[in-house]
Amino acid sequence: MEIENREAKERVAEKILDKVKDGQVIGFGSGTTSYIAVEKIGEKVKREGLNITAISTSNEIKELCEKYGIKIGNLIENKIDWAFDGADEVDLKNMWLIKGRGAAMFKEKLNIIASPITYILVDESKFVDYLGQKCKVPIEVFPTALKYVADELKKLGAVEITYRGMTENNNGILDVKFEKIDKDLEKQVKLITGVIESGLFLEYKNIEVVR
């Protein structure tokens, strides 16, 4: 896989290797930095003969886990010990994130909610002065609700809405630029009928940025 800023992402990914212990259930995030982290964890698992269970957020990460012999679990039968993931934007001042440009925001949010601590692995290119500075907010929407949701998002300050395609869950993705992102926007978006999840991660107390 061709990965931009690979060296920087490898340095960040290596910082969580010491946290991997035999018998743990770990939430595996998506995206390029998470992909590198899974490779490094997989190498450690093989090297040390560890037995861990991954709660995967995408098919791509699931297939990579299987390549390294990492067991795949689910949230019904397992309790996460800790999780890791990447981010598309990080506002360090507020500890707010935009995630989901890889179209896995629903499962990523499930892992973060279910985990006592989630390590967000980011290189310097992901830090912004304010959320939305570089990235639009991805929003997963039930397909037949796309037009209705788009109209409702405009009422919340959406100034640009682009349809991107489908998620692994066969829902649509709207990439949305908002005039302003405040602490209530994530909840307001989620209240729109038809919205499955958004890429806004605001006011989460169990997130630690690893850089």
Image (tube, rainbow, N blue to C red):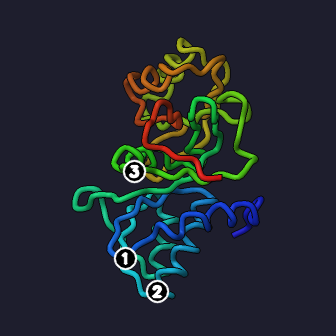
- Label 1: few (<14), some or many (≥20) within 10 Å? few
- Label 3: few (<14), some or many (≥20) within 10 Å? many
Residue where numbered disc 3 is placed: 111
Labelled pair 3, 1 in contact (Cβ < 8 Å): no
Compared with residue 109, is residue 159 higher up or lower down, i.e. above or below?
Answer: above
| Residue depicted at x 53% and y 14% | 156
The residue mark sitting in front, 3 or 1, is 1
Labelled pair 1, 2 in contact (Cβ < 8 Å): yes
| Kind of residue sitting beneath label 3 | Asn
Question: Residue 3: x percent and y percent?
Answer: 73, 63
In the figure, is residue 67 to the left or right of 136? left
Of residues 149 and 28, which is closer to you in this image? Answer: 28
Question: Residue 75: x percent and y percent?
Answer: 29, 56
Residue where numbered disc 2 is placed: 48
Compared with residue 98, is residue 32 higher up or lower down, i.e. above or below?
Answer: below
Q: Earlier in the sequence, mark 2 or mark 3?
A: 2
Query: Which label is found at residue 22?
Result: 1
Q: In which quarter of the image is residue 144?
A: top left
